[in-house]
Amino acid sequence: MRHWSLLFLLLLGAAGSLRSQEKLPVVVVGIVVENMRPDYLQRFADQYSNDGFLKLSHEGWNCTSFTMDQLVQNHASGTATLFTGATPSRHGIVDLQWYDRAKATERHCVFDEKYVTVGTQSPRQGVSPSQLLTPTLADQLKMHTLGKSKVFSIALNSAPAVLSAGFSPDGVYWFDDLSGNMVTSSYYKKELPEWVKRFNDKKTARSLASKNWALLKPVSEYRECEADNDSLEVGFGPGKNTFPYQMEEMIKKGGDFSLLKATPFANTILKSFFLSLMEEENVGKDQYPDMVTVFFSSMDKFSTDFGPSSMEMEDLYLRLDQEIGEIIHFLENSFGKDRFVLYLTSNCSASYPVKILRDRYRIPSGIFAPESAHALLNTYLHAAFGDLRWTDYVSSNQVYLNLKLSGLNNVRPAEIREKAAEFLSQFDGIRLAVTADQIRQNIVPADLVKTMTRSYCPGRSGDVLFLLRDGWQPAMKNRVVPYTSQQQLPLLFYGGVKSAETDPAAYQGTDLAPVLCAILGIQPFIPGEGQALELTERMRVK
C-alpha cells in the first residue's frame, strides 16, 4: 500500500514539475490503431514513407515492451483499460457484451436504451458511458481545468469512442454503418454541430465506396506478405480474397457501409474528420491543454479473415502510414513540434488465423465453439443436479450459470461452479477453467493470478472463466468474436518529448493513463502498475 501511495505522490510531483516549467502541450493527440501488432512497425518499414510510422519510430520515444495482461482482449475492454488506468476488475468492461443477471439479457458495453443515435435518419439505439465504473483520464482533465480543456474522440465503432472519452467530453463521434455518416449519441448532443452536418453532406463514404480497392504500389513491392491468392485466406468470402476489390458491388450487396470499415477508405474518412474537427473546434488555441483521440482500424471485424500476413494487411498499413503522415504534418504546422504530444498505440493486438497456424506452420491449434460447449455443459449439469436449465449464457471465455435453481435441489452454488469448471477443463482448446470463487480466493496457478484477478468483476463476470490454449480461437455461429491471444502492443510518443529514443523497459496497459496525466499536468485517478513514473521521467516533456 505504501508503494502505491509513494508512486501516486511522485506522479503528482512530476505533474507539478511539468506545470511549473510551463511544459504543458497545447494538445495531446492519441492515435489508436485497433488490432495492430507492434511487429508491423518493423515488418513494413522498407515500404513506409519518412513522414508516418518511421517518423514516430525514429524521431520519437518508442516503448518496445508494452503489454495488455488481461483475459479479455478486444477493442472495448482494451480501450477502457488504456484510458482509465484500471483493469476490467475495476472499470467493469469485462467484454464487448456480458450477461445482465438482473434483466436476464445480454448487455452491450455502451448501448443505452435511454438515448438515440444522432446524425442518421434510421432509428438507432444510442450509447453512453453508463457501464463504465471508473472515470477516464479525459474526465480527470475536465475536472482539473474546470471544464475548460476540450476533449474529443473519433472512431469507426461506438465502444472505443465512448470508453476513451468518458463522461464529460465535448464531442464523441463514430462511423454509422447504415448511413455512412459520422454520428453521435443524444447523451452527448441533441443535434450534430453544423460543421459535422457539412462534413456528412459531402457523402464521403458513398464516394469512396464507389471506388475499387486496388494495390497502392506494384505487386512486386509487397514482400512481407503471402501471395494475394493464398488459399488459406478467407477474405470477404468465396471468390473475394484477391485484388482489386469491387467495393461498390460488395457494399451494395451487403446493404450498408459496414464492409467499408475493413478497407483503408474508412481510415481516410476518420483522418479527414479529425482534420476538420481540429480546425472547426479550435483545438489547441488557448492556455488549457486539449485532448483528441482517433481510432483507426486494421480490417475491423474482418481482421482474422485476412490475417497479419495478407497482402491486404500490408496495403492497408502502407496507406495508413500516409494518413498518419498527414496528421503529423498538420500538427507540426499548426502548433510546432514542441507544443503537442502525439502517441500511437493499440487497444488490442491480432493473432494469426487458425487455418494458417495449423495448415501452413503445423502449430497445434483449433476452433473452440462456445455454443457447443454450452449445450454439452448443460447436459452434464442435468445429470449431476437435475433436469433443469443450469446455464444462462456463454461467451468466448466465460459461462454464466443459473444459480437461482440451486435452492430447488438443495445444492450449493459453489458446487455447481466447481462441476462446471471441471467439465470445461476437459475440452480440447481450454487451457484452464476457474470458478469465481477460486479467483476471489486467489486459488489460481501462480502465472495466471494477475491475468484472472484483473479480469474478474463481481456482478458482471461469469461464474466460470476459462482461458484458451495458445493457437486456439473461439468462433460463434451468428456473431463475429473479436479475439486475440497476443498481449504485445505498440506504444510511441512524438512531439514534445525526447527524440530518437528506444525504451526496452516493460510497461502495462494501465500505465498509459497516468503517463498522459503527467504530460497534461493533472492528477491520475489510478497511479498505474509502477512503471508510469519511470516512463514519464525518462521521456520528459521538453
Image: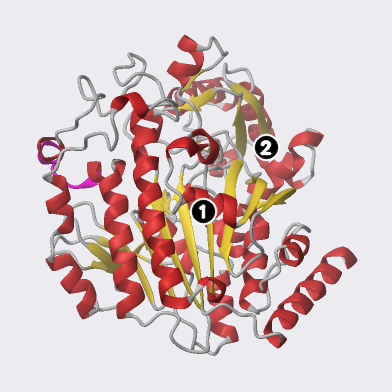
Q: Which residues are magenta?
A: 251-258
Mark 1, residue position? 55
Q: Residue at x 44, y 54 (%)?
A: 51
Q: Are marks 2 and 1 in contact (CB under 8 Å)?
A: no
How packed mark 1 is, by other alpha carbons closer than 10 Å (few <14, some 14-19, many 20 or more), is some
Task: Describe the element under mark 2 as helix, strand or loop.
Answer: strand
Q: Residue at x 65, y 79 (%)?
A: 522
Q: Nearer the viewer, residue 202 or 173?
A: 202
Q: Is residue 6 left or right of residue 50?
A: right
Q: Earlier in the sequence, mark 2 or mark 1?
A: 1
- Which is closer to the viewer, label 2 or label 1? 1
**400 to 87, vertically: above or below:** above
Q: Is residue 168 left or right of residue 219?
A: right
Q: Is residue 103 visible?
A: yes
Mark 2, residue position? 435
In which quarter of the view is residue 4 placed?
bottom right
Q: Is residue 530 left or right of residue 455?
A: right
If the image is split into quadrants, where does the C terminus sit?
bottom right
Q: Position of residue 505 (x, y in %)?
A: 75, 49
Q: Position of residue 463 (x, y in %)?
A: 60, 41
Q: Amino acid at mark 1?
A: Lys
**425 to 537, vertically: above or below:** above
Q: Nearer the viewer, residue 291 or 83?
A: 291
**335 to 503, vertically: above or below:** below
Q: Amino acid at mark 2?
A: Thr
Q: Residue at x 49, y 44 (%)?
A: 74
Measure the C-alpha gap from mark 2 to mark 1: 47 Å
Q: Position of residue 422 (x, y in %)?
A: 66, 24
Q: Position of residue 321 (x, y in %)?
A: 40, 48
